[in-house]
Amino acid sequence: AQKITQTQPGMFVQEKEAVTLDCTYDTSDPSYGLFWYKQPSSGEMIFLIYQGSYDQQNATEGRYSLNFQKARKSANLVISASQLGDSAMYFCAMREGGTGRRALTFGSGTRLQVQP
Amino acid sequence: EAQVTQNPRYLITVTGKKLTVTCSQNMNHEYMSWYRQDPGLGLRQIYYSMNVEVTDKGDVPEGYKVSRKEKRNFPLILESPSPNQTSLYFCASSPRDRGPAGELFFGEGSRLTVL
């Protein structure tokens, strides 16, 4: 079964508007972490934001916020005031705390295109 | 500057010709890992290492080898590359004892084509 599901292969947004990228996850481990990474066309992986399963508040980092709904097992990324430089591939990932592997399990990604 | 460095960044090779992708980090991280990225599949873990001389298989280890003789280096070895190993490869590192937290720091990626 897919542990991380990103149902939007591609998204378009107008510059300066907000956009939400969806991510749902599946785990039975009570301790886990959720991550979002950005991959621009140059290929590098850029860490954006982290949310722990026990964190009471939604994580925020500048224009990025994570809409964490634990009961629904969703961890959507919200980008406010989109910029042309936000055009990239976005990956949601999860680490389960009970495994020693420290592996991140990634979703298939969402390609975001910001239009002027 | 804190970084993970991979080499080569681009490589075209032929089936069966052994190759090594090097990875080095300067952040004194205990944990290092290799991922491959394929369209529609996201990133999948190949191998990981919790510390020097401690390595283990990830989700897609077939056709790969690794070694961890020094803390900073974690090379990925393809003994006999095949076309299905054509992919974008990432090395990553992180501190070890952070529970579920602690982001992975990624190298810039190595694009490998096997003909």
Image: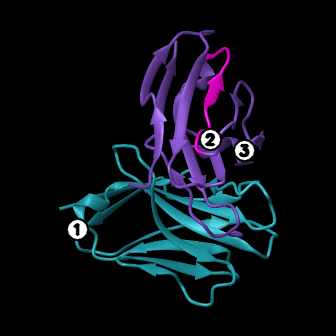
Q: Quadrant of residue A4?
A: bottom right
* Label 3 element class: loop
Residue B18: percent from left, percent from top: 61, 14
Task: Give the Cα separation between the discs numbered 3 and 1.
Answer: 47 Å
Asked whether, in this view, residue B74 is left or right of residue A99, the answer is: left
Q: Are marks 3 and 1 on the same chain?
A: no
Colour for chain A in the figure: cyan
Q: Amino acid at mark 2?
A: Trp
The vertical placement of A58 against A30, above or below, is: below
Residue A81: percent from left, percent from top: 27, 75
Q: Tell which of B45 and A71 is nearer to you.
A: B45
* Label 2 element class: strand
Chain represented in purple: B
Name the disc covering residue A15, or none.
1
**Residue in the picture at 43% in, 55% down:** B2
The extreme bottom residue here reads A56
Chain label for disc 2: B
Q: Amino acid at mark 3?
A: Val
Residue contact between numbered discs 3 and 1, judged by CB atoms under 8 Å: no
The extreme left residue here reads A116
The number of numbered discs placed on residues in the rendered structure image is 3
Name the disc covering residue B52, or none.
3
Quadrant into which the N terminus of chain A falls? bottom right
Asked whether, in this view, residue B32 is left or right of residue A18, the answer is: right
Q: Which residue is mark 2?
A: B34
Query: Which residues, given as a range, are shown in magenta?
Result: B72-82
